[in-house]
Image: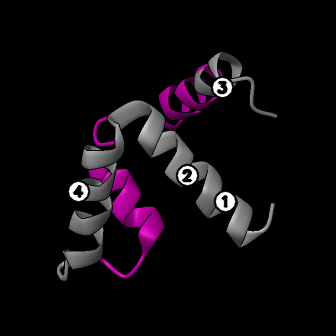
Amino acid sequence: MTNEELISRGIKCLIENLGYIEAGEFLRQIAQNDDQPADYTEWRRENLFKGMSDKEILAGAIKYSEIHNLK
């Protein structure tokens, strides 16, 4: 998957799940967060998946891809 495809799918996912206004606000918050760690993987674990095991994250990703017919 190219960077452009990843960004497009990510934005589409945000809009589908949050709506246009909240998706835009989410992206604005991420862009303005100066204290965000440079390591995105670490930031993602600490913020998006806090308290979840690797197995729980993987199960959630699989379920999401099945619901949204992603391959």
Q: Which residue type does callout 3 highlight?
A: Ile
**Which mark lies nearer to you, 3 or 1?**
1
**SS for dot 4:** helix
Q: Toward the viewer: 20 or 29?
A: 20
Residue denoted by label 1:
6
Q: Position of residue 27 (x, y in %)?
A: 32, 62
Residue 25 is tagged as 4
**Residue 9 visible in the displayed image:** yes
3D distance between C-alphas at marks 3 and 2: 16 Å
Picture residue at 41% right of the left edge, 32% below the top: 17
3D distance between C-alphas at marks 1 and 2: 6 Å
Q: Residues within 10 Å of mark 1 (few under 14, many from 20)?
A: few
Residue 62 is tagged as 3
Residue numbers of the magenta segment: 37-63
Residue denoted by label 2:
10
Q: Main secondary structure of the magenta part?
A: helix
